[in-house]
Protein backbone atom coordinates (compact mmCIF):
# COMPACT_ATOMS: atom_id res chain seq x y z
CA UNK A 1 0.00 0.00 0.00
CA UNK A 2 1.38 3.39 -1.04
CA UNK A 3 0.81 6.20 1.42
CA UNK A 4 0.95 9.78 0.21
CA UNK A 5 1.15 12.69 2.62
CA UNK A 6 -0.31 15.98 1.44
CA UNK A 7 -0.58 18.99 3.72
CA UNK A 8 -4.35 19.48 3.51
CA UNK A 9 -4.07 22.69 5.50
CA UNK A 10 -2.58 24.35 2.44
CA UNK A 11 -5.48 23.40 0.15
CA UNK A 12 -9.17 24.12 0.33
CA UNK A 13 -9.91 20.96 -1.69
CA UNK A 14 -7.94 18.01 -3.03
CA UNK A 15 -9.04 15.21 -5.37
CA UNK A 16 -7.80 11.60 -5.44
CA UNK A 17 -4.49 10.85 -7.16
CA UNK A 18 -4.58 9.42 -10.67
CA UNK A 19 -1.32 8.74 -12.55
CA UNK A 20 0.73 10.38 -9.79
CA UNK A 21 -1.13 13.71 -9.86
CA UNK A 22 -4.28 15.28 -8.49
CA UNK A 23 -6.42 18.39 -8.78
CA UNK A 24 -6.27 20.93 -5.96
CA UNK A 25 -7.95 24.21 -5.08
CA UNK A 26 -6.85 27.27 -3.11
CA UNK A 27 -9.15 30.29 -2.83
CA UNK A 28 -11.26 29.38 -5.89
CA UNK A 29 -8.25 28.73 -8.16
CA UNK A 30 -7.45 25.24 -9.43
CA UNK A 31 -4.38 23.39 -10.65
CA UNK A 32 -2.52 20.10 -10.16
CA UNK A 33 0.13 18.75 -7.81
CA UNK A 34 2.22 15.59 -7.95
CA UNK A 35 2.75 13.03 -5.17
CA UNK A 36 5.71 15.03 -3.83
CA UNK A 37 3.37 18.02 -3.34
CA UNK A 38 4.98 19.93 -6.23
CA UNK A 39 2.72 22.22 -8.21
CA UNK A 40 2.80 20.85 -11.78
CA UNK A 41 -0.04 22.94 -13.24
CA UNK A 42 -0.35 26.44 -11.77
CA UNK A 43 -3.30 27.15 -9.51
CA UNK A 44 -4.61 29.94 -11.73
CA UNK A 45 -7.66 28.40 -13.40
CA UNK A 46 -11.32 28.93 -12.49
CA UNK A 47 -11.82 25.15 -12.83
CA UNK A 48 -10.02 22.09 -14.19
CA UNK A 49 -11.29 18.66 -15.17
CA UNK A 50 -9.58 15.47 -14.18
CA UNK A 51 -6.93 14.28 -16.63
CA UNK A 52 -8.18 12.15 -19.51
CA UNK A 53 -5.78 10.75 -22.11
CA UNK A 54 -3.03 13.04 -20.82
CA UNK A 55 -5.09 16.25 -21.02
CA UNK A 56 -7.20 18.28 -18.62
CA UNK A 57 -9.86 20.76 -19.68
CA UNK A 58 -9.08 24.13 -18.08
CA UNK A 59 -11.54 26.98 -17.57
CA UNK A 60 -10.53 30.63 -17.32
CA UNK A 61 -12.74 33.71 -17.77
CA UNK A 62 -15.54 31.75 -19.52
CA UNK A 63 -13.20 30.12 -22.06
CA UNK A 64 -11.92 26.57 -22.15
CA UNK A 65 -8.83 24.88 -23.50
CA UNK A 66 -6.64 21.86 -22.82
CA UNK A 67 -3.43 21.60 -20.82
CA UNK A 68 -0.79 19.01 -20.07
CA UNK A 69 1.75 19.55 -17.28
CA UNK A 70 1.80 23.35 -17.29
CA UNK A 71 1.82 23.86 -21.04
CA UNK A 72 -1.31 25.07 -22.81
CA UNK A 73 -1.50 22.69 -25.73
CA UNK A 74 -4.84 23.82 -27.11
CA UNK A 75 -5.52 27.50 -26.29
CA UNK A 76 -8.38 28.77 -24.15
CA UNK A 77 -10.79 29.59 -26.96
CA UNK A 78 -13.82 27.34 -26.60
CA UNK A 79 -17.19 28.10 -25.05
CA UNK A 80 -17.53 24.43 -24.03
CA UNK A 81 -14.99 21.62 -24.01
CA UNK A 82 -15.29 17.99 -22.95
CA UNK A 83 -12.49 15.56 -22.03
CA UNK A 84 -10.71 13.50 -24.66
CA UNK A 85 -12.09 10.01 -25.34
CA UNK A 86 -10.64 7.82 -28.05
CA UNK A 87 -8.26 10.59 -29.12
CA UNK A 88 -11.03 13.16 -29.76
CA UNK A 89 -12.69 15.89 -27.70
CA UNK A 90 -16.03 17.57 -28.33
CA UNK A 91 -15.80 21.38 -28.25
CA UNK A 92 -18.18 24.26 -28.85
CA UNK A 93 -17.24 27.61 -30.36
CA UNK A 94 -20.21 29.92 -30.74
CA UNK A 95 -23.12 27.83 -31.99
CA UNK A 96 -20.92 25.18 -33.66
CA UNK A 97 -19.84 21.88 -32.15
CA UNK A 98 -16.78 20.06 -33.48
CA UNK A 99 -14.57 17.13 -32.61
CA UNK A 100 -10.90 18.06 -32.33
CA UNK A 101 -7.80 15.91 -32.16
CA UNK A 102 -4.96 16.31 -29.64
CA UNK A 103 -3.33 18.96 -31.85
CA UNK A 104 -6.50 21.06 -31.76
CA UNK A 105 -7.38 20.37 -35.39
CA UNK A 106 -11.06 20.09 -36.28
CA UNK A 107 -11.86 16.51 -37.30
CA UNK A 108 -15.58 16.75 -37.97
CA UNK A 109 -18.62 18.89 -37.28
CA UNK A 110 -21.18 17.56 -34.86
Image: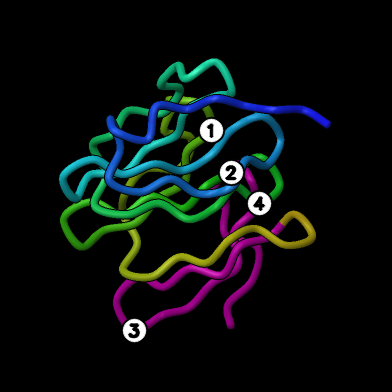
Mark 4 vs mark 3: which is more N-terminal? 4
Residue at image x 40%, y 51%?
Answer: 48
Task: Work out whether 99 lies above or below 28.
Answer: below
Quadrant for the C terminus in the image: bottom right
Q: Nearer the viewer, residue 23 or 56?
A: 23
How far apart are the two marked residues, 4 and 2, measured between alpha carbons? 5 Å
Mark 2 vs mark 1: which is more N-terminal? 2
**Dot 2, crowdedness within 10 Å: few (<14), some or many (≥20)?**
many
Q: Mostly what secondary structure, the magenta segment?
A: strand
Residue denoted by label 3: 95
Q: Nearer the viewer, residue 23 or 109?
A: 23
Residue denoted by label 4: 52
How far apart are the two marked residues, 1 and 4, measured between alpha carbons? 10 Å
Residue lying farthest right?
Answer: 1
SS state under label 2? loop
Q: Position of residue 9 (x, y in %)?
A: 29, 33
SS state under label 4? loop
**Dot 4, crowdedness within 10 Å: few (<14), some or many (≥20)?**
some
Residue 40 included in the magenta stretch of the image = no
**Dot 3, crowdedness within 10 Å: few (<14), some or many (≥20)?**
few
Residue denoted by label 2: 55
Disc 2 versus disc 3: nearer the observer: 2
Residue denoted by label 1: 68
Disc 3 versus disc 1: nearer the observer: 1
Amino acid sequence: MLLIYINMGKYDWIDVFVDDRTRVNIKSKYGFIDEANNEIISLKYDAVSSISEGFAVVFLKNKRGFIDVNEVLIPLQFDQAFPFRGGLALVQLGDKFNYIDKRGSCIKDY
